[in-house]
């Protein structure tokens, strides 16, 4: 597949009374993406915190996030069924996943149209995650093989570490997906500016999703600042300003765009500049800077 249509969400966080209410919101968004003939739909990081409103929101945050992890089986069942029913790829944001003992991780599940599932964990924790929620980092990268080629996922803060996206690009990934959850403009822009940089230096599409809205009674998501976008390399074959499509900040919406994957392949070999190829030509890592006293 050389051309695909993708959708990414500015997902509105709202209280839910039952898991079925959450599932109805998710299904409605999937059906909307199907109506627009999308092959791929991206949910944001931690959009599942809605489910915290099903329990006691006054408990300590580490306990809350571990209770949220107990919803993982139902979440996986929901998205597996929707991906198969509608024949599309679903990047299902993130949900906490329990590990050994009291460990918990922040994992992104990607569901395929034939019942397949791939998982990419978050490798770099924000201070809030590590200090307040006691979430632990994963250590491995997952290259996701789809009907339209290789795809990589860097979860929110992970996109600020260039080596992750470069590792995917070296394995011929043409799409990088960035599910994000940020509480203020500064945090959002850190993710957004780095997503732009990854698109340019690796000559790949970058799809960012965001949470919007708030749950004032839940400290983890008392505020959200978000804007979904589909970003491109900066060259003649692509959109002006390197933005294929983006939403209006902090409004509930779905951002849709069509990706030409053949253009990525052509640009990597014959673009105005060849940053991915030129980086691969370097035979040795850069040495430490040589100090010069002035």
Image (tube, helix red, strand yellow):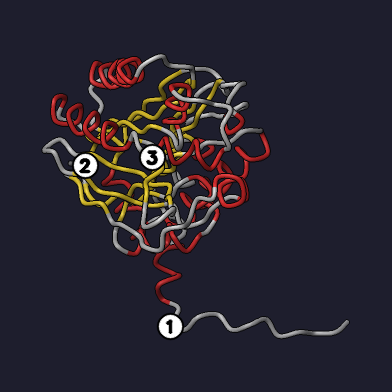
Of the residues under marks 2 and 1, which one precedes in the sequence? 2
Residue 10 higher or lower than 177, as above or below: above
Q: Which residue is mark 2?
A: 2
Nearer the camera: disc 2 or disc 3: 3
Mark 2 Cα-neighbour bin, 10 Å: few <14, some 14–19, many ≥20: few
Q: Secondary structure at mark 1?
A: loop
- Image coordinates of residue 255 in percent, x first then y, are 41, 25
Q: Residue at x 19, y 34 (%)?
A: 80
Give the position of the C terminus as an image quadrant. Answer: bottom right
Quadrant position of residue 90: top left
- Residue closer to the observer: 21 or 61: 61
Quadrant position of residue 44: top left
| 113 on left or right of 186 | left
Q: Which residue is mark 3?
A: 69
Quadrant position of residue 37: top left
Of the residues under marks 2 and 3, which one precedes in the sequence? 2
Q: Which mark is residue 283?
A: 1
Mark 3 Cα-neighbour bin, 10 Å: few <14, some 14–19, many ≥20: many
Work out how far the residue at label 2 is from the one at label 1, CA to CA, in angstroms.
32 Å
Q: Residue at x 48, y 20 (%)?
A: 12
């Amino acid at each position: 597949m050389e051309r695909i249509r993708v959708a990414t969400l500015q997902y509105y966080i709202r209280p839910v009374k039952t898991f079925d209410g959450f599932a109805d919101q998710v299904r409605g968004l999937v059906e909307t993406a199907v109506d627009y003939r999308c092959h791929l739909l991206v949910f944001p990081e931690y959009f599942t915190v809605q489910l915290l409103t099903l329990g006691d929101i006054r408990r300590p945050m580490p306990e809350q996030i571990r209770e949220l992890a107990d919803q993982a089986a139902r979440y996986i069942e929901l998205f597996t069924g929707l991906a198969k029913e509608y024949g599309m790829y679903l990047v299902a944001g993130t949900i906490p996943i329990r590990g050994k003992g009291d460990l918990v991780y922040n994992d992104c599940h990607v569901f395929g149209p034939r019942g397949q599932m791939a998982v990419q964990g978050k490798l770099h924790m924000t201070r809030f995650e590590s200090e307040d929620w006691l979430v632990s980092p994963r250590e491995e990268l997952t290259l996701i093989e789809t009907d339209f080629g290789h795809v990589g996922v860097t979860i929110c803060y992970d996109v600020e570490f260039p080596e992750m996206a470069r590792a995917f690009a070296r394995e011929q990934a043409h799409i990088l997906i960035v599910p994000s959850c940020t509480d203020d403009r500064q945090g959002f822009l850190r993710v957004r500016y780095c997503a732009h940089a990854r698109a340019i230096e690796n000559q790949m599409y970058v799809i960012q999703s965001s949470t919007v809205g708030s749950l004032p009674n839940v400290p983890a998501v008392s505020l959200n600042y978000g804007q979904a976008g589909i970003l491109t390399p900066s060259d003649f074959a692509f959109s002006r300003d390197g933005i294929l499509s983006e939403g209006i900040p902090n409004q509930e919406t779905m951002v849709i765009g069509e990706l030409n994957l053949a253009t990525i392949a052509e640009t990597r070999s014959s673009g105005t500049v060849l940053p991915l190829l030129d980086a691969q030509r370097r035979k040795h890592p850069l040495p430490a800077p040589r100090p010069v006293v002035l």
